[in-house]
Amino acid sequence: MESPGADWSPESELELQEMLLGLASSDEFKKNTRITKEMINDVISKANKPLSKGEVLWRLMMQLDLDVGRDFSRNLEQSGTSSTSQIESQLDWESLLSAINEQTVEHSSEPSVISESTLQNASLESLLQMKCRLEKEVQEWNDWGTQKVMQAAERLNKDRDELQLLRQEKRKRQFMETLRMKYTSLMKEKIVQVMGIKDKARKMKTLNDQLRMELKDAELHAAEVEANSEKASRRMEENLKKLKSFEEERLSLKDELAAEKRRFFQLQQQFEQARGLHDNMKSLWKKEEKLKNDALDMAENERKELEQIEMSAKSQENALKIEAENKLQRYKNDILQLENQIAQLKLVESSSSNIYLSEEESKSALDREWECVMCLSETVSVVLLPCAHQVFCRQCNELHEKKGLKECPSCRTPIQRRVSVRSVTDDPYPDPYPELLIYLAEDSDYTALGDPTAF
């Protein structure tokens, strides 16, 4: 490193002075002298050779790397008149030089060069002279600043009243401006509110018209609904009446069906009884046949008659069996037909007209089955033998017999006998096998012909 006294010039001296002033005004020297001593010890300890006072000061300034000119000018601008007193109080040149002398004496073991020390002493003396000159300049600047401050204070006192008036006018203008802004904003809000009210009034008018139209439509609809409800109530009353009648008819048909079932059970029992009687008659016939065979030698003619009687009895028995089976099948079919009709009535309970028509048809069909073929008004009550057809009532049977007609109108079979039985209207459960009962009554010496209670 080159010695600072090698190329010394007034410019370098001025720079060093400014650097020293900046160094003296820095925060490190403000805080404590101990920090300065520590920094000097650090600079000397880092050097490889003994240093003079100028070298120590130069290295210390290089280490700090301070912009002394910039700090000095900033301090002058900011602090004004107080900067001079602060610099004078803080600038302790004697302490700085004594610290450098002490550290140099402690660490230097060899004498320094005479030329360098003389140069450094001369530079320090010039620095001290420059310090005095600068103090004078600072005092002049301080006086000038004090004068300017006094002038500014006088000017401020003169302009204070005018400033207050201007401030009052400014406040008035601001107040008027705020009032104007508030008034304009309030007027805008009122205008917006009025426009909104107009829009609402227009909407309410249109809505009122719509509501009036809807009210008229609702009144018309209510009148229609009332008329429809009255019609519906009348129809409901009629339907309820029809439903009650249908329910009564259904119950009556149900009772009739139960009665028919009981009748069918009774007929089955009667058929079983007739079958038992037939078996008894058959056993009796066998006994008689044995007796006839025993008396064959005594009466050949009686045997032939008995054989004829036997043949006729067999034919009648077969005819009666066939007719009984036909009657039984027919009544079974009638029962099935009635059950089907009842099922149809249950399905058609919701429709009154269909139930009424089906009922009329069933009644007419049942009446046609038991009405007389001649007068078509009375029920049949006479059985024609041996065909066992029931086609005449009592009056028509007498009229048919008086006319001398000898054939059955259904099958054209010659009529051998006419038997009067109870009619369907007289007995709710007519006997389906009157001819069988007549035949059994004739062979068994029963006098109650055609009476089913004889068994």
Image (cartoon, rainbow, N blue to C red):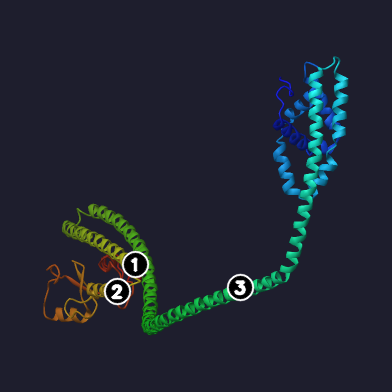
In the figure, residue 357 lies in which quadrant? Answer: bottom left
Q: Amino acid at mark 3?
A: Thr
Quadrant where the image shows the N terminus: top right
Q: Position of residue 452 (x, y in %)?
A: 33, 69
Quadrant where the image shows the C terminus: bottom left
Along the viewing direction, whichever of 369 and 169 lies nearer the viewer:
169
Q: Is residue 127 above or below residue 238?
A: above
In the picture, the disc for residue 359 is 2
| Label 3 – label 1 distance at C-alpha | 91 Å
> Dot 1 surroundings within 10 Å: few (below 14), some, or many (20 or more)?
few
Q: Position of residue 183 (x, y in %)?
A: 57, 77
Name which of mark 2 and mark 1 comes first in the sequence.
Answer: 1
Task: Answer whether labels 2 and 1 touch (C-beta < 8 Å).
Answer: no
Along the viewing direction, whichever of 154 and 134 lies nearer the viewer:
134
| Left or right: 283 in relation to 396 | right
Name which of mark 3 and mark 2 comes first in the sequence.
Answer: 3
Disc 1: which residue: 347
| Label 2 – label 1 distance at C-alpha | 13 Å
In the figure, residue 117 lies in which quadrant? Answer: top right
| Left or right: 303 in relation to 446 | left
- In the picture as drawn, the residue positioned furthest to the top comes out as 110
Q: Amino acid at mark 2?
A: Glu
Provide the secondary structure element on which disc 1 rests. Answer: helix
Provide the secondary structure element on which disc 3 rests. Answer: helix
